[in-house]
Amino acid sequence: MKHKQVAGSSPSTVPVKAAAAGSALPRILLLDDDPFMLEIQSRMLQSMGYPEVTTATRAEAALAMLDDAPQGVDVVVCDLNMPGMDGIEFLQRLNASAFGGAAILLSGEGFRVMHTVRKLLSGGHLMILGALEKPATRSALKDLLELWEPHLAAPAARPQLSITAADLHAANRERQWVLHYQPKVDMRSGAVSGMEALVRWNHPVHGLTYPDHFIGAAEDCGAIDALTEWVLQEAMTQLSRWHAQGLPMRVAVNVSMENLRAPHFVHRISELARETGTSPQDVTLEITESRLMSPSSTPLESLVRLRLQRFELSIDDFGTGHSSLAQLRDVPFTELKVDRGFVRGARHNQIIRPMLEGSIGIAKRMGMKSVAEGAETEDDWHLLRELDCDLAQGYFIGRPMAAERIAEWTLDWQARRAGLSGG
């Protein structure tokens, strides 16, 4: 049993339960300038069985302690509104230090402030388990602390690869691309409605490489048209195979703004549909909303022509750009795809849940299908059903996979959906 103090801390004399043998419980630092609040929080944690609790009333003292022994604390529960060095500066310094633990934000200023602080801290190594309004309840604090795992750390940023135009043109010539498919399911029945085709690069040196490393470079060097044509041809060919097997699938493909500017893109995609025996109604073209702004009318003309030919059009990552409603007004989209940032954990987030509800409501009022990305937990699944979202995709349903793995996944999903309400 340990209870430590740092400079400016208020002592606690409450006995602490012994930890169960072999259990892994986090060592906790409570940082709050109110000694009375510290005492309440400390007693609460001790009664919950957390054996090592440290308290501090000044951020400067807590930071000095963590600088001396960064491995001595696993989770910092930090008030944001502090005298002197406030909680924001404290967490920013922690984010840039050798501290390898996690943090829980605590504030009486409301969730909007805490949401912004989380954005400020994103990109660093500090893992934020969550945010709580003061005074934190026993159950809410317990739920967040249970998210901690030994050796928990934020995922390392992907290394930046050196990719040249020659590399990308060689990849097109040598067909170094690979398609993975992520399932989309109907939220009312749980039935599989289709797949999103996601391109990977089987790089000869770096191995399987994800689109965020090469799509921008492909657009800049003129390699994107050949890449997108390959993706469309492969996805439509696979779609024809599924239909031949009696599977009523649809397929979605991401399309670049550079593709839409190409003068022959609409003609070529129509040719590919005929060559592969694919019905345009079964193909959804996803256009990222944040990239739709364009001084040229060519992309808009291409989108209208594609819609006239009965291809489905989806506005992807809805809510992340600067002109969402104007895009819905001006482009004949048939599907609204809510960005994952407005889906994950929305039930318990007072900021993003209204945005998720509003996006689904807009889609319904405009006669569009609503699709939610980033459904990662069963809780996400049930919330989307409650909000009457049409379709969803995410790790809770299925991760992107090679086409040959889809049959196995389908059997697994059929068994799982039987256990979900209404599945």
Image (cartoon, grey):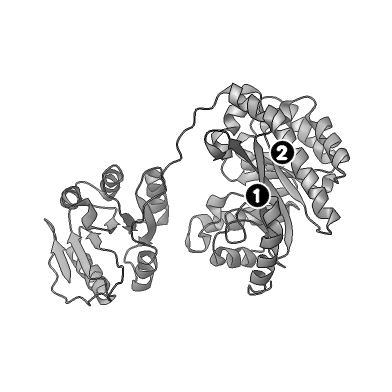
Residue 183, percent from left and from top:
67, 55
Q: Quadrant of the N terminus?
A: bottom left
Instruction: Give the answer, above or below, for where 30 lies relative to 83.
Output: below
- Name the side, left or right, on which 351 lies relative to 308: left
Residue 247, percent from left and from top:
80, 58
Residue 55, percent from left and from top:
19, 62
Badge 1, how many Cα within 10 Å: few under 14, some, many 20+? many
| Local SS, label 1 | strand
Badge 2, how many Cα within 10 Å: few under 14, some, many 20+? many
Amino acid at dot 2: Val
Considering every residue shown, the one lying at the far front of the view is: 204
Instruction: Give the answer, above or below, for where 375 lies relative to 48.
Output: above
Residue 218, percent from left and from top:
62, 28
Amino acid at dot 1: Lys
**Frontmost residue, 91 versus 163:** 163
Residue of label 1: 337
- Name the side, left or right, on which 387 lies relative to 100: right
Q: Which mark is residue 231?
A: 2
**Frontmost residue, 211 versus 10:** 211
First in residue order: circle 1 vs circle 2: 2
Q: Quadrant of residue 390?
A: bottom right
Q: In the image, what residue occupies the spot 45% across and 36% down?
A: 159
Instruction: Give the answer, above or below, for where 203 lies relative to 283.
Output: above
**Frontmost residue, 307 versus 26:** 26
Camera sees residue 414 = yes
Q: In the image, what residue occupies the spot 62% across and 42% down?
A: 324
Q: In the image, what residue occupies the spot 39% across and 68% down?
A: 143
Give the CA separation, mark 1 to mark 2. Answer: 20 Å
Camera sees residue 331 = no
Q: In the image, what residue occupies the spot 26% across and 73% down?
A: 44
